[in-house]
């Protein structure tokens, strides 16, 4: 697997998809640009990158390869326990200690992973998902 970059999203392509989604409102069970919940947002982004994700954050957490927080790369899914019971929120790491997600009351926004007031206390872990289209582009560039 080398440095693990084969599984990380190409940041430019990832951001091209994400940048069009900032400001889309939060909508419970939402999975379109009219409104997203957290897992609807990650499913939409990954679908644009050619990867089908399951419908909720807990099932998305079952996929991929676990990644240590210190080894996060853009495109890694980051998971949180917001209900006190289990994985209940997901976002996409975009680099520089920041993740993008659809947050209730705010919609699609950037948030610092180490936010001391909320997110850092609820962080569960991260997963790297196999994204074939981006891997092919990366291999062609080498």
Image: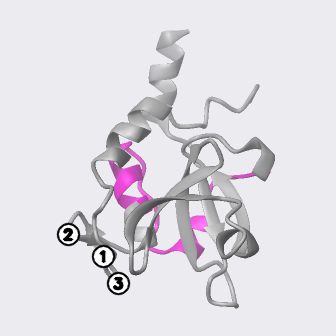
Q: Is residue 62 visible?
A: no
Which numbered disc flags the more N-terminal residue, 3 or 2? 3
Please report contact status of discs 1 and 2: CB closer than 8 Å, yes or no.
Answer: yes
Residue for badge 1: 30
Residue drawn where x is 68% and y is 57% of the image: 126
Residue drawn where x is 62% and y is 89% of the image: 83
Q: Give, as a single range, the part of the protein colored magenta.
A: 42-68
- For the residues labelled 3 and 1, the Cα–Cα distance comes to 5 Å
Label 2: which secondary element: loop
Label 1: which secondary element: loop
Residue drawn where x is 65% and y is 30% of the image: 5
Q: Is residue 87 above or below residue 43?
A: below
Q: Quadrant of the C terminus?
A: top right
Residue for badge 3: 28
Give yes or no for residue 56 being in the magenta stretch: yes
Please report contact status of discs 3 and 1: CB closer than 8 Å, yes or no.
Answer: yes
Please report contact status of discs 3 and 2: CB closer than 8 Å, yes or no.
Answer: no
**Image quarter for residue 3?**
top right
**Image quarter for residue 130?**
top right
Q: Categorize mark 1 by other alpha carbons within 10 Å: few (<14), some (14-19), many (20+).
A: some
**Image quarter for residue 55?**
bottom left
Label 3: which secondary element: loop
Give yes or no for residue 110 being in the magenta stretch: no
Residue for badge 2: 34
Q: Categorize mark 3 by other alpha carbons within 10 Å: few (<14), some (14-19), many (20+).
A: few
């Amino acid at each position: 697997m080398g440095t693990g970059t084969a599984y990380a999203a190409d940041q430019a392509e990832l951001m091209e998809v994400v940048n069009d989604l900032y400001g889309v409102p939060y909508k419970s069970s939402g999975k379109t640009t009219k409104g997203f919940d957290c897992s609807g947002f990650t499913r939409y982004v990954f679908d644009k990158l050619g990867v089908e994700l399951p419908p909720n954050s807990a099932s998305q957490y079952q996929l991929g390869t676990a990644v240590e927080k210190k080894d996060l790369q853009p495109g890694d899914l980051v998971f949180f326990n917001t209900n006190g019971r289990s994985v209940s929120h997901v976002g996409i790491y975009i680099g520089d200690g920041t993740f993008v997600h659809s947050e209730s009351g705010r919609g699609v926004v950037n948030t610092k992973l180490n936010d001391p007031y909320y997110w850092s206390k609820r962080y569960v872990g991260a997963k790297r998902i196999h994204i074939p289209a981006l891997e092919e582009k990366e291999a062609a560039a080498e």
